[in-house]
Image (tube, helix red, strand yellow):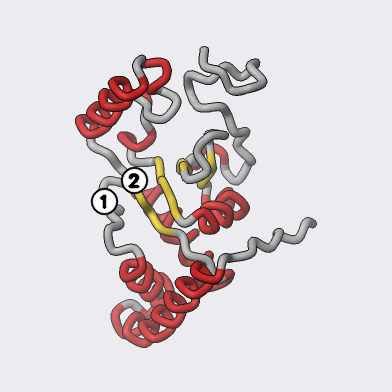
């Protein structure tokens, strides 16, 4: 079996990870009092909440929430990696606004689809998509996420993962983002 590759951290990221882990350790006794069987998960959530205060996990499906919580708990406690959320569930109107803004910025719906999908196609609207940070956390999730049915699905978005329990740990082949011609060598649009 292949050993997981080590992902070196930048000094600043190493400091953030260490401080967050220390906070989690300090919060662990409170977690044991609050929820004895879930103390590590709770302490992790609190510590990561201090590190990433703008996170909003509401609107994710129960499965996506449970998978993300379990994955980031393992990442912190077992590997010292931080996995934060920049965007999860999006209301259809918000997704439509993002798509419309990208159409205006890029000049066409086809080019907009390279970065933003319309609501009917977006995993964010379904509550199964997670845009994560920092990059080292995304690398950890790419390497270990299949255990939690979390998969990076697009070649051009290192941060975008989706909860896909239908895969049951089977690797999900990454695909080019919609609007990319898979036959084009340079990633030209269709």
For mark 1, does the 10 Å Cα neighbourhood hold few (<14), some (14 to 19), or many (20 or more) residues? few
Q: Position of residue 28 (x, y in %)?
A: 39, 83
Question: Would you say residue 78 is visible in this rendering?
Answer: yes
Question: Would you say residue 119 is visible in this rendering?
Answer: no
Label 2 close to label 1 by CB (< 8 Å): yes
Residue under numbered circle 2: 88
Q: Quadrant of the image for the N terminus?
A: bottom right
Task: Judge left or right: residue 57 versus residue 40.
Answer: left
Q: Nearer the viewer, residue 148 or 18?
A: 18
For residue 150, which numbered disc appears in the image?
A: none
Residue 38, located in which quarter of the rendered image?
Answer: bottom left
Residue mark closest to the camera, 2 vs 1: 2
Q: Nearer the viewer, residue 105 or 99?
A: 105
Residue 3, located in which quarter of the rendered image?
Answer: bottom right
For mark 2, does the 10 Å Cα neighbourhood hold few (<14), some (14 to 19), or many (20 or more) residues? many
Q: Residue at x 32, y 24 (%)?
A: 105
Counting residues from the start of the chain, the first of labels 2 and 1 encountered is 1
Task: Judge left or right: residue 122 versus residue 7.
Answer: left
Q: Residue at x 38, y 54 (%)?
A: 85
Q: Position of residue 96 (x, y in %)?
A: 25, 26
Q: Residue at x 34, y 37 (%)?
A: 124
Q: Position of residue 97 (x, y in %)?
A: 23, 29
Q: Nearer the viewer, residue 16 or 154?
A: 16
Outermost residue on the right side: it is: 1
Callout 2: helix, strand or loop? loop
Residue under numbered circle 1: 58
**Picture mark count:** 2
Q: Position of residue 75 (x, y in %)?
A: 53, 65
Q: Residue at x 34, y 80 (%)?
A: 31
Callout 1: helix, strand or loop? loop
In the displayed structure, 35 sits above or below 175; it is below
């Amino acid at each position: 079996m292949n050993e997981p590759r080590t992902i070196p951290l930048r000094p600043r990221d190493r400091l953030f990870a260490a401080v967050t882990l220390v906070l989690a350790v300090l919060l662990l006794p409170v977690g044991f009092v609050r929820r004895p069987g879930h103390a590590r998960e709770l302490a992790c959530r609190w510590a990561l909440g201090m590190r990433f205060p703008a996170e909003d996990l509401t609107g994710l499906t129960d499965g996506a929430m449970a998978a993300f919580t379990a994955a980031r708990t393992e990442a912190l406690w077992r590997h010292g990696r931080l996995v934060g959320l920049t965007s999860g569930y999006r209301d259809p109107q918000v997704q439509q606004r993002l798509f419309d803004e990208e159409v205006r910025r890029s000049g066409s719906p086809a080019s907009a689809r390279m970065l933003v999908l319309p609501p009917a196609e977006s995993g964010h609207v379904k509550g199964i998509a997670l845009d994560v940070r920092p990059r080292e956390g995304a690398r950890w999730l790419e390497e270990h996420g299949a255990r939690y049915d979390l998969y990076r699905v697009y070649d051009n978005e290192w941060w975008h993962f989706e909860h896909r329990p239908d895969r049951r740990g089977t690797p999900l082949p990454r695909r080019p983002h919609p609007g990319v011609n898979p036959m084009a060598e340079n990633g030209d649009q269709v």
